[in-house]
Image: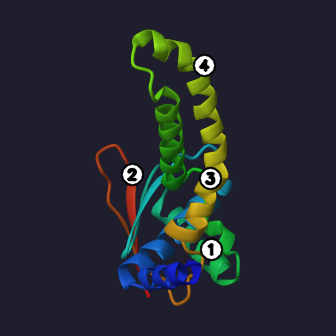
């Protein structure tokens, strides 16, 4: 069963839009990591697509270009771990699902307000445990599903600045 699951996973992940989105997601994380190391306190948000990634935050196009090129070079050089980032939305979704399910299970069968209030301390403990459990699970899910550190022939084609009002926005277009 496991080997069959692996075959289906490999087939799915080899589809060009999924493969490119996973690699761009990894490059996005690596770029954010490098930018954050260079400029402490920098707040950035990214969103990956099959054609590249959007980056929102107070960063110049030149700084973004330098960081993205370094990220790509380092990942092609073997630093594939740069593809995983602790503040990825994948981690937040994993934590939300885990805490929500823990709360649901904790309140299961509590049919009155008094019963729910009585269970609240247990539900808080269950949700907290679920959040702790979700941290390594979210990182593993990133590593195995939502990102790829294998850049292969990926290259940066161009970077466009696309401001959205007061928000500085860029799109890093990739090919390969």
Vertical arrangement, residue 132 with respect to residue 16, above or below: above
Vertical arrangement, residue 129 with respect to residue 45, above or below: above
Instruction: Tell me how far mark 3 sits from mark 4, CA to CA.
Output: 28 Å
Which residue is more in the foreground, 64 or 28? Answer: 28
Residue that badge 4 annotates: 121
Marks 1 and 4 close (CB-CB < 8 Å): no
x and y, in percent, of residue 23 in the image: 50, 76
Instruction: Tell me how far mark 1 sits from mark 4, CA to CA.
Output: 48 Å
Q: Earlier in the sequence, mark 2 or mark 4?
A: 4
Q: Secondary structure at mark 3?
A: loop
Residue at position x 34%, y 43% from top?
166
Few, some or many residues within 10 Å of mark 4 (<14, 14–19, 20+) = few
Nearer to us of marks 1 and 4 is: 4
Q: Earlier in the sequence, mark 1 or mark 3?
A: 1
Q: Quadrant of residue 76?
A: bottom right
Q: Secondary structure at mark 2?
A: loop
Q: Earlier in the sequence, mark 1 or mark 2?
A: 1
Nearer to us of marks 3 and 4 is: 4
Instruction: Tell me how far mark 1 sits from mark 3, CA to CA.
Output: 20 Å
x and y, in percent, of residue 125 in the image: 64, 28
Badge number at residue 70: 1
Few, some or many residues within 10 Å of mark 2 (<14, 14–19, 20+) = some
Q: Is residue 164 rendered to the left or right of residue 18?
A: left
Marks 2 and 3 close (CB-CB < 8 Å): no
Instruction: Tell me how far mark 1 sits from mark 2, CA to CA.
Output: 21 Å
Q: Earlier in the sequence, mark 2 or mark 3?
A: 3
Badge number at residue 168: 2
Nearer to us of marks 2 and 4 is: 4
Pick the quarter of the image with the N terminus.
bottom right
Badge number at residue 86: 3
């Amino acid at each position: 069963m496991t080997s069959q699951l692996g075959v289906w996973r490999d087939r799915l992940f080899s589809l060009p839009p999924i493969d490119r989105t996973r690699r761009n997601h990894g490059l996005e994380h690596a770029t954010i990591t490098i930018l954050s190391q260079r400029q402490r306190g920098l707040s950035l948000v990214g969103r990956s697509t099959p054609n590249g990634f959007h980056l929102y935050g107070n960063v110049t196009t030149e700084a973004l270009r330098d960081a993205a090129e370094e990220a790509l070079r380092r990942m092609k050089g073997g630093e594939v771990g740069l593809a995983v980032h602790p503040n990825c939305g994948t981690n937040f979704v994993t934590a939300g699902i885990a805490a929500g399910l823990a709360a649901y299970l904790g309140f299961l069968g509590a049919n009155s307000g008094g019963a729910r209030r009585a269970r609240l301390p247990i539900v808080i403990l269950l949700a907290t445990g679920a959040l702790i459990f979700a941290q390594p699970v979210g990182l593993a899910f990133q590593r195995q599903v939502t990102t790829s550190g294998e850049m292969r022939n990926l290259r940066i084609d161009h970077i466009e600045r696309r401001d959205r009002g007061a928000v500085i926005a860029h799109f890093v277009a990739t090919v390969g």
